[in-house]
Image (spheres, grey):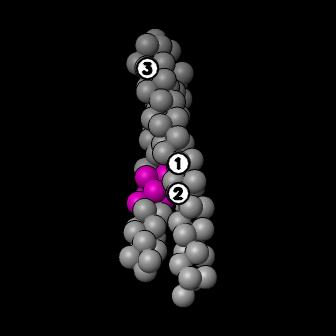
Amino acid sequence: MEKQIEDIGKRISELEKILEVLIIAIHKEQTTYKFYQDLGNSTEHEGTRRMFIKVANQKLSHKGMLEMELKKLQQEIDKLKSKM
């Protein structure tokens, strides 16, 4: 039983490290979204504006995917903690 609890603890620790990376990545995606959105809003050339807005929306999409992974990971951690 102690070995099982130790293994669960190690797995939780690994998952929490991944969680930290996801949190940083989400923040980066939000920051780059704002950057490209601002560029798009400040340029006069229509083609360039559309390109920057498209990239901004891709960043927002990436952020959403990372947030879904974060949620799944947190649920897995919670489930493991309930087994301890």
Asked whether the residues under the numbered discs 2 and 1 touch, taking CB atoms below 8 Å apart as contact, a structural biologist would say: yes
Q: Nearer the viewer, residue 75 or 57?
A: 75
Q: Quadrant of the C terminus?
A: bottom left
Which residue is drawn at the image coordinates 51% and 30% (left, top)?
32
Look at the numbered disc 1 and give the secondary structure of its residue: helix
Look at the numbered disc 3 and give the secondary structure of its residue: helix
From the image, give the main secondary structure of the stretch colored magenta. Answer: helix
Residue 10: x and y, percent? 60, 68
| Vertical placement of residue 48 versus 10, above or below | above
Q: Which residue is mark 2?
A: 16
Between discs 1 and 3, the one toward the N terminus: 1
For residue 34, side relative to residue 8 (left or right): left
Look at the numbered disc 2 and give the secondary structure of its residue: helix
Q: Quadrant of the N terminus?
A: bottom right
Which residue is drawn at the image coordinates 42% and 72% (left, top)?
81
Which residue is drawn at the image coordinates 47% and 29% (left, top)?
31
The magenta stretch spans which residues?
66-72
Asked whether the residues under the numbered discs 2 and 3 touch, taking CB atoms below 8 Å apart as contact, a structural biologist would say: no
Between discs 2 and 3, the one toward the N terminus: 2
Which residue is drawn at the image coordinates 38% and 76% (left, top)?
82
Q: Nearer the viewer, residue 25 or 1?
A: 1
| Vertical placement of residue 76 versus 34, above or below | below
> Distance of mark 2 from mark 1, alpha carbons?
6 Å
> Distance of mark 2 from mark 3, alpha carbons?
33 Å
Q: Which residue is mark 1?
A: 20
Q: Does the magenta portion include 71? A: yes
> Distance of mark 1 from mark 3, alpha carbons?
27 Å
Q: Which residue is mark 3?
A: 38
